[in-house]
Image (cartoon, helix red, strand yellow):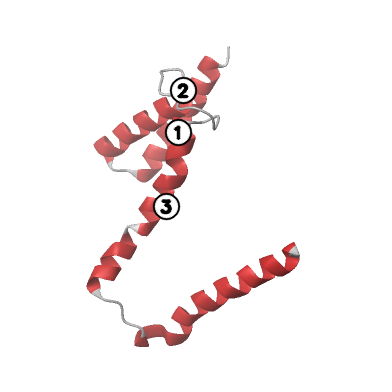
Amino acid sequence: MNFTVLILGMAIITVLIKAIFFILGDRLVFPAWLHLALSFVPVTVLTAIITPMILSPHGKNLELHLRNPQLLASLIAVLVCLISRRQLLTIAVGLMSFFFFQWQFAG
């Protein structure tokens, strides 16, 4: 199958699915349980993306040791988040600690 046709077909389907919600607007009412379930989607997707990069940064085996800069920086970021509850501080400390550990373990 031609990849261009495949990609265009997927794009059209995606746009149509999203357009239905905009076209119907307030006439489409979801039950409360579905609203609650959908509120967890962003956190779940972000966790599914980040966890493999932390636990297996090279894509082969789990790297659960103290020379894994992603793991150490993420643990520090979790601690900062739990203590401060400030997103910008958590991001800054997480990035600084990741770059520090990456530099420290480079040699």
Q: State yes or no: discs 1 and 2 in contact (Cβ < 8 Å).
A: yes
Residue 20 image offset from top left, x and y in percent: 48, 81
Q: How crowded is mark 3: few (under 14 residues within 10 Å), some or many (20 or more)?
A: few
Spatial CA span between label 3 and label 2: 23 Å
Q: In this view, does 50 lie above or below 11?
A: above
Say which amino acid is labelled 3.
Val
Q: Residue at x 29, y 69 (%)?
A: 35
Spatial CA span between label 3 and label 1: 15 Å
Residue pointed to by mark 1? 54
- Which element is circle 2 on? loop
Residue 45: assigned label: 3
Q: Nearer the viewer, residue 48 or 22?
A: 48
Q: Residue at x 52, y 16 (%)?
A: 105
Q: Which residue is drawn at 62% across and 70% down?
A: 11
Q: In which quarter of the image is residue 10?
A: bottom right
Residue 42 image offset from top left, x and y in percent: 39, 56
Quadrant showing the N terminus: bottom right
Q: State yes or no: discs 3 and 1 in contact (Cβ < 8 Å).
A: no
Q: Which of 59 and 21 is in front in this view?
A: 59
Residue 4 image offset from top left, x and y in percent: 74, 66
Which label's residue is closer to the chain start, 3 or 1?
Answer: 3
Which label's residue is closer to the chain start, 1 or 2?
Answer: 1
